[in-house]
Amino acid sequence: MLGVLATPQIGHRSGEFQELYARVLKRLQDFLATRNHVYLATSSATGVMEGAIRNLVQKRCLNLTCGAFSERWHQITKANGKAADALAVEWGEPNSPEALDDALSTGKYDAVTLVHNETSTGLMNPLAEMAEVVRNHPDVLLAVDAVSSMAVVDIDIDQLGLDVVLAGTQKGFGLPSGLTVFVVSERAMQRAQEVPDRGYYFDFLDFEKYHERQQTPSTPPIPQLYGLDRRLEGILALGREKWFARHLQMAETTRAWARRYFDLFPRKGYESVSLTAIKNTRGIRVAELQAELGRRGFAISGGYGKLKEKTFRIGHMGDIEPADLEVLLKTIEEVLEI
């Protein structure tokens, strides 16, 4: 992959780039199994989170929060001058379809934001159930942060009726950051046509205009496109089912290990497939564990925000292999002498 990322640059308005773009977009549609609009943005996923707000919200937005990154989407909504309410649950708890239905039944909202996989707590929200609720409110659009779930679990974007789904390439795709993949429904494109002041950089209509030319609106990170092309080629050759099954296998291995030596942080039945958030039941010094693992060539994440030293997180997504994970878990046992 490093060799692919070092491919010499090409002009982003050249015919050669158009060929690369067309190939990547076709492979993305095949991998994501969607017929909706698929675009590439030169930014972190946070940029497209803001773009979704600017393009979709006319009346009032309901931000479903359950951790740090879902709370960020609420902050983004307010920072863009949109009327918004947060429907919050405790960290480690999933968002509730029943509470969502009650909120949407008020008729106050025309958009909902949901984080599918909340990495701060290691929780995966019940996306299918939440999407079903939103579909019962036809005037409401659903935007989904799939930053750490896209390319990890199979998301049936079209069947679920998701209006915006976004992910950075540095998580499930296992590539460098700086490129965001996002999918937009026809309903969302129609809403964007009605919304004034969509901004400049993330105007969905602008993305479609340039897509018709097989280009991006702004200068793209071409090395990441070469890397994404190679990654998708490999995934499709392996088979989507095997790719997703490998991620689930690693998640189950890590959960079993965590239950043996510690405990899991999120509510049972809502554990992430992308990473495992482990409750620090032994009272270890997480920062010291991270430092020692770093000296041995490994990296794990500590607890995020208010969960610092209360949890630690082990990622198992992208190009991590089950054998890599097994070595990491054995190394943690050695360091902690457990």
Image (cartoon, rainbow, N blue to C red):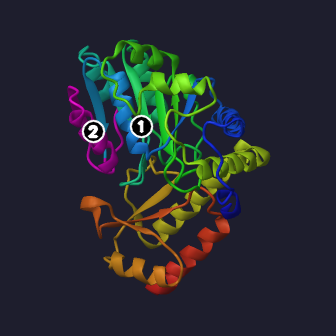
Which amino acid type corresponds to the residue marked 1 in the rendered image? Answer: Val
Asked if residue 93 is among those painted magenta in the image, a careful observer would answer: yes
Q: Is residue 268 above or below residue 260?
A: above
Total numbered badges shown on the rendered structure:
2
Residue 82, which numbered label?
none
For label 1, the crowd category at 10 Å Cα-Cα, with few meaning under 14, some 14 to 19 and many 20 or more, is many
Quarter that holds the N terminus? bottom right
Residue for point 50% across, 54% down: 177
The image's mark for residue 76 is 2
**Residue 211 visible in the snapshot:** yes
Q: Secondary structure at mark 1?
A: helix
The span picked out in magenta is 67-96
Kindly report the distance in space between the C-alpha atoms of the residues bearing marks 2 and 1. Answer: 11 Å
Mark 2 surroundings: few (<14), some (14-19) or many (≥20) residues within 10 A:
some
Q: Position of residue 281 (x, y in %)?
A: 34, 71
Task: Specify the label residue 48 is tagged with.
Answer: 1
Q: Position of residue 122 (x, y in %)?
A: 41, 54
* Rendering coords of residue 163 (x, y %): 47, 24
Q: Residue at x 49, y 30 (%)?
A: 128
Q: Is residue 9 above or below residue 33?
A: below
Q: Is residue 44 left or right of residue 169?
A: left
**Left or right of residue 85, residue 56 in this image:** right
